[in-house]
């Protein structure tokens, strides 16, 4: 949720039913959305805000999603992720710069809650070399077993991500890379507090949907079985700009 790495800075909470599934799988009701919500809200000093500038293409994206029949919502942080909306982002409202882990937690001297996180791959690796993980793996490498956790480091899920490009007739973030004069003008505006591109990480508009019924017939049996495991409010496709 917070992210110490380079990312799109979007702030979203999980869907209520996916958290209910997690709670069921680990047999711990603390993971229910309503039980976790106070902790999400107590996310201070992480600051969440909307960019003060909407990218021109986002307004077209909104119109396109309306047109194809995806509903607009204000609810990406309310336990539902289906539909489309402008995103909340990890932005500091005062200066509209990034609310990074460094700025939000380390520099503010946040001491009461520390989470050691080395990423999806290296968190389990770090635990395993410390003696916490599947006993069979630990013994293979001669590591003393402190806690036998057979599931640790197993069953990683990932998602496909791809980005088709089309030339459009409105300013986009790509102009900052390709047009030095445009970049310079945006830099000047940012320095003097303007509401332009450099206050928006882009991808400020998102639609999330279930795979439409007419496309589901193309799914393989394995995909159908995998999708049958997840709850009904599980996002199956996300469109970002
Ligand atoms: C392209 C992209 C876009 C994304 N966009 C978003 C978004 O908009 N919003 C969002 O919420 N999430 C987003 N994410 C996901 C988000 O970035 C990750 O979930 C998040 O960074 C995970 O944070 P982390 O601290 O667990 O791990 P990481 O950010 O991976 O940080 C782990 C750090 O630990 C260090 N490390 C590892 N092992 C050791 C060790 N043994 N000793 C010392 N250091 C170690 C690594 O070098 C790394 O710096 C995006 C991810 C990608 C790839």
Image: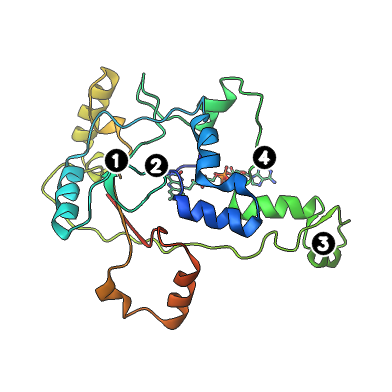
Q: Which residue is mark 3?
A: 138
Report the Cα–Cα distance between label 1 and label 3: 47 Å
Could you say whether the residue bearing mark 1 is in a helix, strand or loop? loop
Marker disc for residue 218: none
Q: Position of residue 73 (x, y in %)?
A: 27, 45
Q: Which residue is mark 1?
A: 74
Mark 1 neighbour density, 10 Å: few (under 14) some (14–19) many (20 or more):
few
| 222 sits left or right of 236 in the view | right
In front: label 1 or label 3: 1
Report the Cα–Cα distance between label 2 and label 4: 27 Å
Numbered circles on residues, count: 4
- Residue located 66% across and 24% down the image: 111
The answer to whether marks 2 and 3 mark residues whose Cβ atoms lie closer than 8 Å is no
Q: Which residue is mark 4?
A: 116
In front: label 4 or label 1: 1
The disc, 2 or 3, on the residue closer to the chain's N-terminal end is: 2
Report the Cα–Cα distance between label 2 and label 3: 41 Å
Could you say whether the residue bearing mark 4 is in a helix, strand or loop? loop
In front: label 2 or label 4: 2
Report the Cα–Cα distance between label 4 and label 3: 21 Å
């Amino acid at each position: 949720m917070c992210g110490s790495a380079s990312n799109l800075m979007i702030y979203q909470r999980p869907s209520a039913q996916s958290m209910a599934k997690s709670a069921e799988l680990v047999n711990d009701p603390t993971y229910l959305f309503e039980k976790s919500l106070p902790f999400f809200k107590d996310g201070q000093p992480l600051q969440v805000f909307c960019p003060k500038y909407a990218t021109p293409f986002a307004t077209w994206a909104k119109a396109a999603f309306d047109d194809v029949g995806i509903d607009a919502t204000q609810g990406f942080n309310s336990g539902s992720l289906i539909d489309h909306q402008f995103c909340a982002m990890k932005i500091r409202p005062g200066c509209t710069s990034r609310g990074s882990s460094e700025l939000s937690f380390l520099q503010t001297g946040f001491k009461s809650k520390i989470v050691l996180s080395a990423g999806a791959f290296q968190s389990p690796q770090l635990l395993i070399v410390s003696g916490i993980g599947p006993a069979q793996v630990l013994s293979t490498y001669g590591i003393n077993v402190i806690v036998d956790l057979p599931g640790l480091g197993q069953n990683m899920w990932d998602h496909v991500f791809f980005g088709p490009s089309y030339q459009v007739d409105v300013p986009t973030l790509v102009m900052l890379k390709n047009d030095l004069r445009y970049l310079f003008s945006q830099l000047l505006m940012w320095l003097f507090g303007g509401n332009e591109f450099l206050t928006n990480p882009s991808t400020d508009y998102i639609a999330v949907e279930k795979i439409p019924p007419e496309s589901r017939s193309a799914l393989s049996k394995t995909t159908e079985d995998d999708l049958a495991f997840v709850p009904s409010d599980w996002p199956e496709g996300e469109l970002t700009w």
